[in-house]
Structures are given as C-alpha cells and as structure tokens.
Image (cartoon, helix red, strand yellow):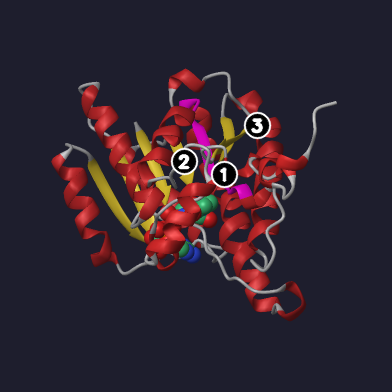
Amino acid sequence: MRVLVTGAASGIGRATCLRLARDARARGQAAKIAAVDFVPLRELDSLIEDLGKLDAEALALHADMGSADAPAQVVAEAVGRFGGLDGLVSNAGINRPGALLQYSVDDWDRVFAVNTRATWLLAKAAHPALKAARGAIVAVASMSGSNPHANLGAYGPSKAALIMLVQVLAQELGPDGIRVNTLSPGMVRTGMTAKVYADPRIAAERDALVPLGRVATPDDVADVIAFLLGPDARYVNGHDLVVDGGVSGNFLGRLPGLSRITRG
Ligand code: NAI
C-alpha cells in the first residue's frame, strides 16, 4: 500500500504510519509511506527508523499544509517516488484556542488553512493517482466538528467544515472509485494535548467522563484509520466515524437532579 500521511511526526499520524507498515508486513508486503510534517526533517528520523524496522519504504517530507502550494508538492513527490498512491490520510491539524469575540482574523485563517483547506488541496492533487488505484482518503476531523466547543476559536468551525468538505468530496469522487471519509476522535493523549494530561487530576477527571473509562491512545484512532483505508470499508463513503469511547453522548446522563426524578 502506497500512502501519504500528513502530521506524521507525532500522535495519531505517527501511530497511523506504524499501523499501516505493520499491516503491510503481515500481508508479506512492504508499505510505502510518505510521512509529511511541518517539523524539521530530523524530527521525523525516529519514525523513519521505526518504519524501516517494519520493512516499510518511507519518504520524509517537510511541508506546511497551511500553505496553498505544499499539498500538491508533497503529493507529486510521493507519486513520483512510489509510482502512484493508494491512500491519503489528511491528519495534520492545529488548535488555536480563544473566545470568538477576541479572536484574530490571522488565527481564523491559519486554522482553516491547515485543518480544512489542506484536505481539499491534497484531494485535488491526489485525484489522478487515487483514481488509477481506486484508493481512499481519510481526513481526521474531531468531535468538536459536530458538538459546539466554546473558547476553541476556529477549531470547531474548521472541523465542521472539514466533515462537510469530505461529504461533498465523497459525492464527487465516488464515481471514480475513490472513497472519502472523516474520522472524528474524542479525547486523545498526543502532543497536541500533552499539557492537559500532564496534570494527573485533570487526566483522571477526563478518563471518568468517558463511558469506556479512559481517554484514547493514538493507536485507538490509528486502527480505525487503517480500517477506513482498507478493503473491509469498501462500501463506506462520505461517513464521519466518531471514535470517542462514547464521550460526546454522555451529556444527558450528567444532568444535575436526575436522581430526584420519580417514576410515573
Ligand atoms: P499532534 O500535535 O500530536 O500531531 C499533529 C502533527 O501535525 C504534529 O506532528 C505537527 O507538527 C503536525 N502539523 C501541525 N501543523 C502542520 C502543518 N501546517 N503542516 C504539516 N504538519 C503539521 O496532534 P494529534 O492529536 O495527533 O492530531 C492529529 C489530528 O487529530 C489533528 O487534526 C487534530 O485536530 C485531531 N484531533 C486530535 C484530538 C486529540 O485529543 N489529540 C481530538 C480530536 C481531533
């Protein structure tokens, strides 16, 4: 499988690269993975080394998915190296919290450029290769894309727009045999959220909110990305798959006063 993964240096993106490499090896194949990130290339070294141990061929690419040109450039480099592309994982994302009344236009535009526009530009650029391979696209959205999340600035709106962008892409690219889906994680321990979980009290409170009793690991999400990319999801198209342990549905059960409701 030839796959391009953005935001590959850390968290969900890193776990996805490793999962895809393990899967390919289990099939007796070598994964070909273009690992794209904004960090300096040397920060991708340990990932490339780990992918090599799994017999994967890895291409490390330094690029800013918030720029208008970089998505097409990285797709061209990956297609040039691997001779095509079977999958695209648009995972790079940023969070610039803030109350909307004080929010700046620069922050709004940057968050939308990385979290939303990049997926469109990657899909445009990868379309010929994905059409040839009858491939798949998975974009990583968020539960904040379908549940209003105060004081996170443009994050929720950008993820909501991403979910709809992907649904439209699914309609337009489906006839070419390309499936396009989003995966919306709940709470995940990654680089993006490391400061939150550094406080054991907050970490325990967050675990307790989740019906499954714990916040997700990057692997919990990567395993489902692999499913959406793979043949078992061959008839899944235009779907937003929520991977949150049930946490975004637990609001009504926490309403104050429930124990006082009497049976009629
Ligand atoms: P992370 O911070 O561990 O990894 C994100 C990676 O994306 C980093 O390596 C970063 O350098 C890279 N990146 C950021 N901006 C970039 C850019 N402009 N161009 C290229 N690469 C860039 O975060 P995590 O949690 O693994 O995030 C992955 C995705 O999951 C994001 O889209 C995020 O919004 C989403 N997500 C994360 C949740 C969480 O609780 N951690 C919850 C819901 C969604």
> Up-down: is 175 above or below 126?
above
The tag earlier along the polypeptide, 3 or 2, is 2
Which amino acid type corresponds to the residue marked 1 in the rendered image?
A: Ala
The quadrant of the picture occupied by the C terminus is top right
Judging by the rendered image, the residue that carries numbered circle 2 is 88
- Magenta region, residue range: 133-143
Distance between the alpha carbons at the discs numbered 2 and 1: 8 Å
Mark 2: few, some, or many residues within 10 Å (few <14, many ≥20)?
many
The tag earlier along the polypeptide, 1 or 3, is 1
**Ligand 1 has an atom within 8 Å of the beta carbon of the residue at disc 1:** no
Distance between the alpha carbons at the discs numbered 1 and 3: 14 Å
Judging by the rendered image, the residue that carries numbered circle 1 is 123
Residue visible at 51% across and 42% down?
126
Residue 72 seen in the figure: no
| Res 164 label | none
Residue 233 pos. (x, y %): 51, 22
Question: Mark 1 and mark 2 in contact (Cβ < 8 Å)?
Answer: yes
